[in-house]
Amino acid sequence: MSMSIRLSTASDAGALTRLAALDDAAGLSGRALIAERDGVAIAAVALTSGRVVTAPSPRAAAAVHLLRLRRYQLLRQGGRVARMSSLSSAAA
């Protein structure tokens, strides 16, 4: 099984809503980083707030750790979350 981390797009709204429901949490607002395992979203972190939503999974803790690390790296590279163009190019 492979895991990937990527920046959310408008087409990820359903996956983010599903993760929030599985986590019994409010949905994330704004852009997020999504961890996917074999093409299925298992966790996400909001870029602005750092809030996390996860699916119940034994691998979710590892995914959350990697999401937080990648968010930190992007914030350090881009300076501010509001500059989405720099975050998008850094995530590519």
Image (spheres, rainbow, N blue to C red):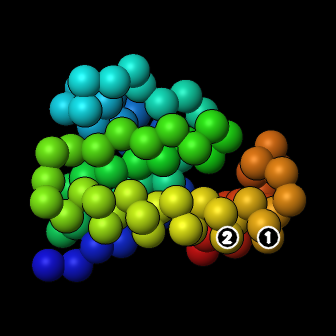
Query: In which quadrant of the rendered image does the C terminus lie?
Result: bottom right
Relative image position of residue 31 (x, y in whole percent): 58, 42
Reply above or below: 8 against 10. below
Q: Secondary structure at mark 1?
A: helix
Reply above or below: 32 against 21. below
Please state which of residues 41 and 25 is positioned toward the viewer in this rendering: 25
The amino acid pointed to by label 1 is Gln
Q: Is residue 23 visible?
A: yes
Image point 55% across, 68% down: which residue? 69
Figure disc tally = 2
Q: Quadrant of residue 65?
A: bottom left
Cα separation between marks 1 and 2: 6 Å
Q: Which mark is residue 73?
A: 2
Query: In which quadrant of the rendered image does the N terminus lie?
Result: bottom left
Q: Which mark is residue 77?
A: 1
The answer to whether mark 1 and mark 2 are in CB contact below 8 A is yes
Relative image position of residue 18 (x, y in whole percent): 24, 32
| Direction from residue 49 to residue 9 in the image, left or right | left
The amino acid pointed to by label 2 is Gln
Q: Which mark is residue 27?
A: none
Relative image position of residue 79 (x, y in whole percent): 86, 59
Image point 56% across, 68% down: which residue? 70
Relative image position of residue 2 (x, y in whole percent): 22, 79
Image point 19% across, 64% down: which residue? 59
